[in-house]
């Protein structure tokens, strides 16, 4: 077990106190490799541990599979392309992917915003995904379903609900968004993500493919046996990001500054690179897209109790609103979260497959919502 702390600025809670909280929280999680990382106004405290023997590369420097926690990266990319005028939220995906191709009327109405906010009416995965996936469900369910098949399934879809009327979490929809943005810009998704998000934020240890040998964390089944690295096939935008916990903190620190955003009126003030509660942005043109990614855009559930931004789940807490997203792959889990305007961000990774009684997400969520 190691404790790594960096303190470029004053923090409301001392790094030593934060380290004790993280060490206590880690006792609730059973995984071969575990990283709990907290940033308070840029002061970082990272706890690493787990049941496996540490390898030659420190756990906080390994790249972990984020699974669905990749979606906030897709959201920030879309917000940035909209800010640049290259696409609009209300652009229709089918028109960008295959102009003139005959599609179902409901598919014709699906916009980029619908795809990202899980309101497109599309199912979680394409109907024809399961026959090829079930025989290799525990080893490689996505690798045999490439990008062109995702696009074809979208263009031939028959949504059960009119776009914009219901919320249904969909890896299919966010994957279609990725292919649509690539088509609209003439740039592969991986290149777009690097140019627009990873490079401007200095995320040098974040990628969408496995890295050099020994630099990627190895996932495990519940019985502790290792699983192969994830191949997302054509679902890259929905779950392919891999990152070190330190890069995850950098990504969250970019989001955490500033107060809870509200919708500005036309002609309102332009965002700046100032980051109250967070570090200064090296690229101030990211400030507007980051604010857009934090902005609440819809409510769902019983009595519309659950709020969402473009990509983040948005909950109340005793210390103010929290924004978060969790993800899981065949053998790994990740959690990203922050409290806007407070300087607090939490990133967590674990290398054991999720199960019904798993405590990982609840533990990471508690660090975000139960501490001042």
Image (tube, rainbow, N blue to C red):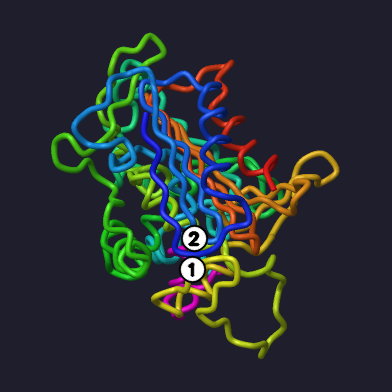
| 152 horizontally vs 320: left or right | left
Q: Percent from the top left, x then y, of residue 62?
A: 28, 39
User: Does 234 sit left or right of 160 as displayed?
Assistant: left
Question: Which label is found at residue 42?
Answer: 2
Query: Where does the N terminus fall, quadrant-wise?
Result: top left
Q: Quadrant of residue 2?
A: top left
Residue 324: x %, y % from top left: 59, 47
User: Among all residues in the image, which is located at the extreme top?
Assistant: 223
Q: Give the image location of residue 117, x and y in percent.
A: 59, 53
- For numbered disc 1, what is the local secondary structure? loop
**Which disc is residue 279 wearing?**
1
- The reply, left or right, for residue 248 in relation to residue 119 is left
Of the pair 259 and 68, the residue shown nearer to us: 259
Instruction: Please report the bounds of the magenta region as a residue range.
Output: 76-90
Badge 2 density bin: few <14, some 14–19, many ≥20, Cα 10 Å: many
Asked if the residues shown at circle 2 and circle 1 are in contact, with their CB atoms under 8 angstroms apart, the answer is yes
320, 167: nearer the viewer: 320
Number of numbered discs present?
A: 2
Front in this rendered view, residue 7 or 337: 7
User: Considering only vertical position in the picture, is 30 above or below 261?
Assistant: above
The x, y position of residue 327, in whole percent, is 48, 37
Give the CA separation, mark 2 to mark 1.
Answer: 6 Å
What's the residue at 71%, 47% (across, down)? 315
Q: Under tag 2, what secondary structure?
A: loop
Residue beneath the point at 70% across and 40% down:
370
Give the residue at the far bottom of this rendering: 267
Q: Is residue 40 magenta?
A: no
Question: Does 339 sit above or below residue 263?
Answer: above
């Amino acid at each position: 077990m190691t404790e790594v702390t960096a303190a470029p600025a004053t923090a409301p809670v001392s790094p030593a106190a934060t380290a004790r909280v993280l060490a206590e929280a880690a006792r609730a999680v059973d995984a071969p490799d575990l990283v709990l990382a907290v940033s308070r106004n840029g002061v970082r405290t990272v706890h690493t541990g787990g049941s496996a023997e540490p390898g030659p590369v420190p756990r906080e420097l390994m790249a972990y599979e984020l699974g669905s926690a990749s979606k906030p990266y897709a959201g920030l990319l879309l917000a940035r392309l909209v800010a640049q005028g290259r696409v609009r939220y209300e652009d229709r995906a089918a028109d960008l992917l295959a102009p003139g191709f005959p599609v179902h009327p409901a598919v014709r109405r699906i916009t980029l915003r619908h795809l990202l906010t899980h309101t497109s009416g599309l199912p979680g995965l394409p109907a024809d995904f399961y026959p090829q996936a079930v025989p290799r469900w525990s080893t490689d369910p996505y690798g045999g379903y490439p990008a062109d098949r995702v696009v074809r399934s979208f263009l031939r879809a028959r949504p059960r609900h009119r776009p914009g009327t219901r919320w249904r979490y969909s890896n299919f929809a966010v994957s279609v968004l990725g292919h649509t943005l690539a088509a609209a810009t003439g740039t592969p998704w991986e290149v777009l993500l690097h140019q627009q998000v990873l490079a401007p934020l200095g995320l040098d240890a974040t990628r969408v493919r496995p890295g050099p040998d020994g630099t990627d964390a190895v996932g495990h089944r519940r019985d502790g046996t290792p699983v192969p690295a994830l191949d997302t096939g054509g679902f890259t935008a929905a779950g392919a990001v891999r990152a070190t916990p330190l890069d995850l903190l950098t990504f969250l620190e970019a989001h955490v500054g500033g107060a809870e955003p509200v919708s500005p009126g036309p002609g309102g003030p332009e965002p700046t690179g100032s980051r109250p509660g967070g570090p200064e942005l090296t690229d101030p043109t990211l400030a507007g897209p980051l604010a857009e990614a934090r902005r609440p855009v819809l409510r769902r559930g019983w009595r519309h109790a659950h709020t969402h931004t473009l990509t983040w789940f948005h909950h109340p807490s005793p210390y103010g609103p929290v924004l978060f997203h969790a993800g899981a792959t065949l053998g790994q889990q990740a959690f990203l979260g922050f409290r806007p305007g407070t300087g607090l961000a939490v990133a967590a990774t674990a290398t054991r497959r999720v199960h019904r009684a798993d405590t990982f997400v609840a533990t990471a969520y508690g660090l975000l919502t139960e501490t001042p």
